[in-house]
Amino acid sequence: MAELCLVHANCQGEALSRLLSSHPPFARCFTIKHYLNYTREAVPPADLSRAKLFLYQKLGAHFGDLASEVLLTYLSPSCQSIQLPNLFFKGYWPFWISAPERIDFADSVLEWLLDAQLPPNDIVRIYLSGAHPAFQRLAQTAEASLAREYTKEEGCALGCADLVAALWRTEPLFYTVNHPGTRLIIHVAGQLLQLLGLPPLTEASKAHFVHPDGDFFLPIHPLVGRALHLPFADHQTRYPVFGQMLTHREFVASYLACRLHKVKNLAAFLHGRAGSI
């Protein structure tokens, strides 16, 4: 009978859980329950006490009863606990900021232009022209973001920083700043299976894996693509955006429309506009 594996992680845990559950050697050993950490979803003590594998992204003391150090105390001595990476990369989106009071996936340059109360056409023109000091720091932003990933991996058994460093300029490794793509999820799963002494993923299981976040690729500014020599990001590139295939310019128009309507949930707004652009 399969034992319980608890995954305490953000949406990256959903992608990993889906891949592991489709891998027969893992599925024979474990049944997965995924609890979302960033929504502060409660983890029943009964599940913690009977789990045989606990996969978690580390949460600090400010999460109270859901802090990783607290949850680990509820595990049985026979439970193996492994810290998962919590991947985040601003290299493709150097202007991203956390501003949920305004909009999710906020762009610092667009927000600066909106604060100036310029007409939408002027905002688009200025933004696409690169007339802002932030465009002079693109490489430094990417390097700082990657350095932070190396720091986060210190002392952890699993990591992706070396892979990101090797490939981020040649292929798109992330869908958004905190949504790693298929290659990175497969890389984490492969390391985990090796650590557990289980057979590796088959080529078939890799090929058939459908990433749950693959329907939204946050478009990359073409000037970022040009400056950082990204072959997959120019003004003609179309990105999957909830059933649409949008250029970066079309996405910017949707972003501004979302802000004009005072909607903070950009994803929901884009869902509603599917097929209308």
Image: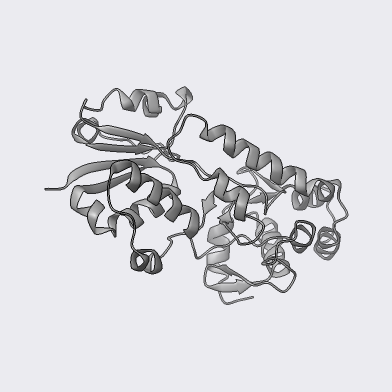
Q: Residue at x 28, y 53 (%)?
A: 199
The answer to whether residue 20 shows anywhere in this view is: yes
Question: Left of 224 or right of it: where is 192?
Answer: left
Q: Measuring 66% from the left and 49% from the top, which residue is drawn there?
A: 106
Q: Quadrant of the C terminus?
A: bottom right
Which percent across, then down, holds residue 52? 22, 36
Q: Residue at x 57, y 55 (%)?
A: 174
Is 197 placed above or below 79 here?
A: below
Q: Position of residue 123 (x, y in %)?
A: 82, 59
* Residue 104 visible from this viewpoint: no
Q: Considering only vertical position in the picture, is 37 above or below 242?
A: above
Is 120 placed left or right of 260 in the picture?
Answer: right
Residue placed furthest toward the right: 131
- How far across and down, in percent of the image, does residue 253 sit? 71, 66
Residues 44 and 93: in front is 93
| Residue 99 in the image, given as x and y percentages of width and height | 64, 42
Nearest the eye: 165 or 223: 165
Q: From the viewer's perspective, is 269 left or right of 13?
A: right
Is residue 262 rendered to the left or right of residue 67? right
